[in-house]
Image (cartoon, helix red, strand yellow):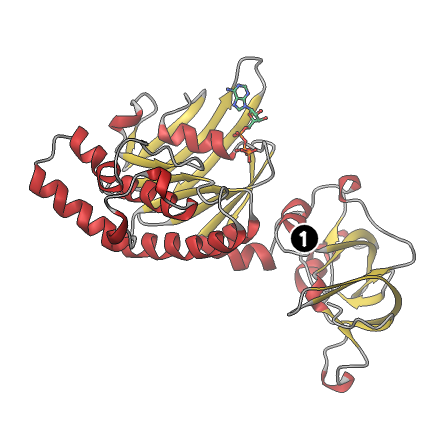
C-alpha cells in the first residue's frame, strides 16, 4: 500500500503545449480518488504519468514516499485497469487472472490459492474455465479487475473501466468497484468523464479542466461549495442555473426577484462596499411550486412567475424548463470567480408555474 503525491507535475507533448499543468495532489494510503473533467482535460495523461506510461515533463511523483519519476511501470508496483479489457483470448478466465503471478514465478499452489480468492471476491467462480469470447462485457471487466488485484499491488489505476458497459451494467459494476476498493483498502485513482460515477465512487474528487486542477474535495463539498463557475456547472445533473445578479446591502437582485445574501458573499461584498455584479447559481432542486408548499414554514426566498417551455418526466423526477425574462447567461462570458451557491426545482408539469425560490445567492464577477 502507498500514498501517491504529485508535486507541480506537468506534461508537454511534442509541440510544446502543456496538456497537464502544475498538478499538485496528495492521495492518502487507501484513499479512492477520482479524476473527472471534460474530454481532453488531461485526466488520462495524469494517470499515465502515475503509471509510468507517459514521461513526466516536470515536477515530482512520489509513491510510498519515494520519488519514482524515472522508474519503469513494472517497478512501481501498481496495477492498471483500462476501458478495453485487454484479456488474452486464448487463455481461460483462471489463466488470465493467474497471468501476472506466473510472470512473477509464484509457485503453483500459491497461484491457485490467490486465483480462488480473487474469483470469490469478484464472483467469478463459475466462470473460471471459460474463455473471454464466451463472457459478457461486465464479466470480462470483472476478470480484468481480478487480474489487476491478484498481484496485491500498492495501488490501482483505473481509466474509464466501465465506459464500455451498458447503463444498467455500469451501475452494477460501480457497486462492485466500490465494494472491492473498500474490502481491499488499496489506494485507487480512477479516471472518468461521468460526474455521477465521480460523485458516487470517490472519497475525494479532483475536477480538471484544460490540464489544470480546479478543485479537490469530497463529493458533497464539491456540490455544495464549488470554487468556481466551471465546477458549479460541471457537477450536478441537471446542471446548475446561472443568472446575472447585483449584490447590494443584504440582498442579491436577479431576474427572479430579490434573494437574501449568503454569509460568504456578504463578507466579500462588505469588503467591496459598492453594489457588485454577481452570478447567481441556482440548483434545479431548490425551486418549488408555490402552490404546492406551505409558504409560512419557509425561509425567505423569491417568488416569480414563469412560463414552462418544456417538461421532461423521468418518472421519479420531472424537470420543468422555464424562461426567465428571456435571459439565459452563457457561462463562457463569465469570469472565473469564487462562488457560494444557493439553489432552486420545479416539480410541476402544469404549464403556468408560480414558483418560489428557496435557495440564495451568488458569486462575484470580476
Ligand atoms: P478523454 O476523456 O477524452 O480521454 P482526457 O481528459 O483523458 O480525455 P488526455 O487523454 O489526457 O485527456 O489528453 C489531454 C490532451 O493531451 C488532449 O488534448 C490530447 O489531444 C493531448 N494528447 C494526449 N496524448 C497525446 C500525445 N501522445 N501527443 C500529443 N498530444 C496528446
Q: Say which residue appears at 22% left-offset and 37% top-offset.
A: 95
Q: Is residue 61 left or right of residue 347?
A: left
Picture quarter with ligand 1: top right
Where residue 311 appears, as percent x and y from the top left, is 79, 63
Where residue 281 appears, as percent x and y from the top left, is 73, 56
Q: Say which residue appears at 35% left-offset and 47% top-offset.
A: 142
- Residue 34, above or below 8: below
Quadrant of the frame with the N terminus: top left
Res 350 quadrant in image: bottom right
State whether label 1 is within 8 Å of ligand 1: no
- Residue 85, above or below 222: above
**Residue 168 visible in the current orientation:** yes
- Residue 198, above or below 315: above
Where residue 92 appears, as percent x and y from the top left, is 25, 38
- How crowded pointer 1 is (Cα within 10 Å; few <14, some 14-19, many 20+) is rated as many
Q: Is residue 101 left or right of residue 249?
A: left
Location of mark 1 (residue) = 339
Q: Is residue 148 left or right of residue 112?
A: right
Taking depth in this image into account, of 161 and 326 the one nearest to the observer is 161
The outermost residue toward the right is 325
Amino acid at each position: 500500500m502507498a500514498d501517491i503525491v504529485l508535486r507541480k507535475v506537468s506534461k508537454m507533448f511534442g509541440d510544446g503545449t502543456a496538456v497537464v499543468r502544475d498538478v499538485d495532489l496528495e492521495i492518502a494510503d487507501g484513499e479512492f480518488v477520482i479524476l473527472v473533467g471534460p474530454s481532453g482535460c488531461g485526466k488520462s495523461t495524469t494517470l499515465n504519468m502515475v503509471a509510468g506510461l507517459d514521461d513526466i515533463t516536470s515536477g515530482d511523483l512520489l509513491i510510498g514516499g519515494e520519488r519514482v519519476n524515472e522508474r519503469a511501470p513494472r517497478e512501481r508496483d501498481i496495477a492498471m485497469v483500462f476501458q478495453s479489457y485487454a484479456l488474452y483470448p486464448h487463455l481461460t478466465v483462471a489463466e488470465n487472472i493467474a497471468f501476472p503471478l506466473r510472470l512473477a514465478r509464484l509457485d503453483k499452489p500459491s497461484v491457485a490459492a490467490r486465483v480462488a480468492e480473487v474469483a470469490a471476491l469478484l464472483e467469478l467462480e463459475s466462470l473460471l474455465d471459460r474463455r473471454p469470447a464466451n463472457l459478457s462485457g461486465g464479466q470480462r471487466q470483472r476478470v480484468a479487475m481480478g487480474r489487476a488485484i491478484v498481484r496485491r499491488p500498492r495501488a490501482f489505476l483505473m481509466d474509464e473501466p466501465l465506459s464500455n458497459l451498458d447503463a444498467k451494467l455500469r451501475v452494477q459494476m460501480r457497486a462492485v468497484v466500490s465494494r472491492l476498493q473498500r474490502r481491499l483498502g488499496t489506494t485507487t485513482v480512477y479516471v472518468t468523464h461521468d460526474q455521477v460515477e465521480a460523485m458516487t465512487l470517490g472519497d475525494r474528487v479532483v475536477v480538471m479542466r484544460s490540464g489544470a486542477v480546479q478543485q479537490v474535495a469530497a463529493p458533497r463539498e464539491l456540490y455544495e461549495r464549488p470554487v468556481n463557475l466551471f465546477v458549479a456547472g460541471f457537477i450536478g445533473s441537471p446542471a446548475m442555473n446561472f443568472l446575472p445578479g447585483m449584490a447590494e446591502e443584504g440582498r442579491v437582485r436577479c431576474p427572479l426577484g430579490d434573494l437574501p445574501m449568503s454569509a460568504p458573499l456578504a463578507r466579500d461584498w462588505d469588503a467591496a462596499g459598492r453594489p457588485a455584479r454577481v452570478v447567481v447559481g441556482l440548483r434545479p432542486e431548490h425551486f418549488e411550486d408555490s402552490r404546492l408548499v406551505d409558504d409560512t414554514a419557509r425561509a425567505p426566498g423569491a417568488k416569480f412567475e414563469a412560463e414552462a417551455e418544456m417538461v421532461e418526466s423521468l418518472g421519479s423526477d420531472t424537470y420543468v424548463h422555464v424562461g426567465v425574462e428571456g435571459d439565459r447567461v452563457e457561462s463562457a462570458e463569465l469570469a472565473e470567480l469564487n462562488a457560494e451557491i444557493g439553489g432552486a426545482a420545479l416539480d410541476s408539469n402544469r404549464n403556468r408555474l408560480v414558483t418560489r425560490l428557496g435557495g440564495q445567492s451568488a458569486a462575484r464577477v470580476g
